[in-house]
């Protein structure tokens, strides 16, 4: 990553306990002074326990105003949100409140005075008719799930902010702050206990290493990127492929991993097909290639 000069930056990042927010927060800690970085975690979370971190719900306008007035950020990275498909379908009002109303609050409170980077996701696409080279920024979203639909609505809250950047990210792959979030943690925790793990061979994502994603996002913030960008791995990877790599690396029981089709999941949330992202615009902006995900 290019060595940034953050002397004029005061960065507020929400969702620091998310699978993608945590590595970005850690990266920012390595380049920013503590008094120029402020992190927001969910209300129920107690970690990370630092003086520049607070537990705030995205629907709490009063606390967000207090942070704005006391911290006075120049840049916002909005990484908070409901991304669990099952939770989104079971609690659509909750997902809408956090994803959409939360975005509306961030845009209204910070949007006119700060540069805002919103981290959306590939789930704004259905993957039913994927473009040959992946979805680029010109393709029309057609989300299937509550999560995907609320992400898209959240994006629309930020397009009115004069200095906004929306980054649709692929599937972040890495360690979470508690060891309980993200694809790797979920799959490995089941395989470790020899519990059955059924994964789809026909649902593909743009897997990207969490630390590499953090490098890209931090550099984009430093360069004041504006507009819409896609940021994911260079090739589509199926959920079953992910499980197989984790199983082989950990030498777990092969019988525990089952190969399944998304069309057979009749009781689950709406499933995507191939939502591989074309990240050439982001690579051109950063002037380097995203590495293929390897586990």
Image (cartoon, rainbow, N blue to C red):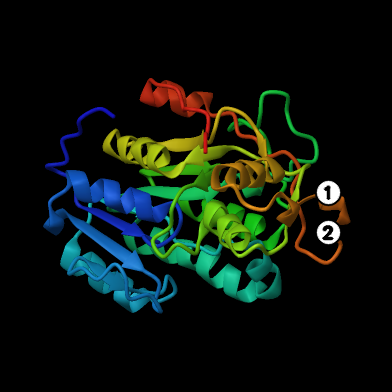
**Image spot of residue 141 (x, y percent):** 68, 43
Q: Look at the picture and state if 195 lies above or below 230.
A: below
Query: Can residue 156 be seen in this snapshot?
Result: no
Disc 1 secondary structure class: loop
Q: Residue at 21% of width from left, 68% of height from top? A: 50
Neighbour class for label 1 at 10 Å: few (<14), some, many (≥20)? few
Give the residue drawn at x 46%, y 27%: 290
Residue at position x 38%, y 42% in the image = 211
Total labels: the figure holds: 2
**Quadrant of the drawing holding the N terminus:** top left
Q: Position of residue 122 (x, y in %)?
A: 61, 44
* Label number found at residue 83: none
- Residue 206 vs residue 82, the one in the foreground: 206
Q: Quick check: 173 left or right of 69?
A: right
List the residue tagged with mark 2: 265
> 291 above or below 53?
above
Element class at badge 2: loop
- Residue 270 placement (x, y as % from top left): 77, 58
User: Which label number is shown at residue 261?
Assistant: 1
The answer to whether any part of residue 37 appears in the image is yes
The answer to the question of whether label 2 and label 1 lie on touching residues, with beta carbons closer than 8 A, is: yes
Cα–Cα gap, marks 2 and 1: 7 Å
Give the x, y percent position of residue 146: 68, 62
Q: Residues within 10 Å of mark 2 (few under 14, many from 20)?
A: few
Q: Is residue 279 above or below residue 179?
A: above
Relative to 132, is 125 above or below? below
Horizontal arrangement in the rendering, residue 235 relative to residue 131 (left or right): left
């Amino acid at each position: 990553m290019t060595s940034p000069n953050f002397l004029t930056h005061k960065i507020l990042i929400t969702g620091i306990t998310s699978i993608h927010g945590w590595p970005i927060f850690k990266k920012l800690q390595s380049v920013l002074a503590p008094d120029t970085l402020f992190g927001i975690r969910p209300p129920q979370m107690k970690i990370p326990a630092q003086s520049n971190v607070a537990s705030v719900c995205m629907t709490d306008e009063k606390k967000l105003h207090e942070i704005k007035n006391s911290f006075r950020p120049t840049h916002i990275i909005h990484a908070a949100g409901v991304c669990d498909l099952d939770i989104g379908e079971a609690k659509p009002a909750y997902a809408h409140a956090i994803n959409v109303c939360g975005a509306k609050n961030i845009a209204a409170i910070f949007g006119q005075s700060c540069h805002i980077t919103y981290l959306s996701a590939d789930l704004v696409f259905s993957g039913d008719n994927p473009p040959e080279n992946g979805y680029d920024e010109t393709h029309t979203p057609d989300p299937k799930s509550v999560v995907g639909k609320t992400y898209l609505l959240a994006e629309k809250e930020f397009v009115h902010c004069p200095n906004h950047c929306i980054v649709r990210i692929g599937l972040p792959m890495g360690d979470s702050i508690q060891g309980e979030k993200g694809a790797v943690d979920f799959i490995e925790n089941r395989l470790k206990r020899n519990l059955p793990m059924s994964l789809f061979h026909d649902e593909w994502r743009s897997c990207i290493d969490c630390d590499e994603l953090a490098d890209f996002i931090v550099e984009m913030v430093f360069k004041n990127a504006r507009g819409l960008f896609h940021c994911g791995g260079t090739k589509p990877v199926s959920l079953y492929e992910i499980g197989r790599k984790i199983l082989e690396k950990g030498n777990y029981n092969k019988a525990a991993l089952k190969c399944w089709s998304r069309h057979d999941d009749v009781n689950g949330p709406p499933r995507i097909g191939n939502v591989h992202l074309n990240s050439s615009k982001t690579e051109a902006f950063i002037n380097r290639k995203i590495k293929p995900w390897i586990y």
